[in-house]
Image (spheres, grey):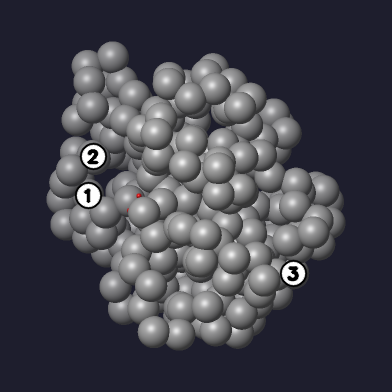
Amino acid sequence: MQITAQNWPYPRWVAHRGAGKLAPENTLASFRLGAQHGYRMFECDVKLSADGVPFLLHDDTLERTSSGKGLGGDHAWGALAQLDAGSWHSRSYAGETIATLDNVAAFCLRNSYFLNIEIKPTPGVERLTGEAVAHHASRLWRGHAIPPLLSSFSLESLQGAHTAQPALPRGLLLDELWDGWLEAAQQLGCVAVICNHLLWNADTVGQVKAAGMRTLSYTVNDADAAQRLIGLETDGIITDRVDQFSPAG
Ligand code: G3P
Ligand code: MG
């Protein structure tokens, strides 16, 4: 299925890093908890190990969310696989491991869940990461109707993904409206712009819709903010608060 603004299969509500802050972010345990709250689409952060395995980690470094040290991308997957990615969160998740993109694909595909893969490259390998993640995603989702939505703050990563697997849908992530953002999204063939929710207003929503793209927001944890975005007729809300927002809404 070719994803376009007109042909848009994804649900409104997206669980950030699996289940936000309720479980160790970007682990399978977090995805399972998000699913238990009824979520059918998940966002996760993906980068490459030193030997090219796409795995889930938000930060450049391992310290905050695992028992490892240093840049995640400096370690081979065999070493990353030994780390404890759950104890930092709480005792009940001790021993939870870092997830690979392959692990998450298996979970999502078996359950018919949707995925937003944020390409979160280690600095210096932006383009390579975009290419590799797109190639892996294309292989993993081959034969399945709904591909994952690839997104990134990095233009180089999105360019890499576009070149490697042009048929996979892409979204430009924005934390500010830098000069030329809309043209950049169009040039990259994006189907969506995914903004810090505070950046959306009638004007910015109108510009993106007129350019033929969908409008998504991160990270929305407040009911008033969610209502404002729904009132603006935006298309997607990425939240940590899977316990507060019903994904049916
Ligand atoms: O992909 C949306 C959101 O996750 C972007 O910010 O820092 O939480 O990865 P961050
Ligand atoms: Mg993210």
Residue 145 pos. (x, y %): 82, 48
Looking at the picture, tell me which residue is in the foreground, 233 or 20.
233
Residue that label 3 marks: 167
- The answer to whether the residue bearing label 3 lies less than 8 angstroms from the nearest atom of ligand 1 is no
Q: Amino acid at mark 3?
A: Ala
What residue is shown at x 51% (from left), y 66% (from top)? Answer: 203
Q: Earlier in the sequence, mark 2 or mark 3?
A: 2
What residue is shown at x 47% (from left), y 74% (from top)? Answer: 157
Disc assigned to residue 66: 2
Residue 114 pos. (x, y %): 65, 41
In which quarter of the view is residue 133 placed?
bottom right
- Give the total of numbered labels: 3
Mark 2 vs mark 3: in front: 3
What residue is shown at x 41% (from left), y 52% (from top)? Answer: 197
- Crowding around mark 2 (Cα neighbors within 10 Å: few <14, some 14 to 19, many 20+) is many
Tag 1 secondary structure: loop
Label 2 and label 3: CA atoms lie apart by 34 Å
The answer to whether any part of residue 94 appears in the image is yes
- The answer to whether the residue bearing label 1 lies less than 8 angstroms from the nearest atom of ligand 1 is no
- Crowding around mark 1 (Cα neighbors within 10 Å: few <14, some 14 to 19, many 20+) is some
Q: Earlier in the sequence, mark 1 or mark 3?
A: 1
Looking at the picture, tell me which residue is in the foreground, 49 or 236.
236
Label 1 and label 3: CA atoms lie apart by 32 Å
Residue 91 pos. (x, y %): 22, 16
Quarter of the picture holding the N terminus: bottom right
Q: Amino acid at mark 2?
A: Ser
Disc assigned to residue 62: 1
> Image height check: is 42 above or below 88?
below
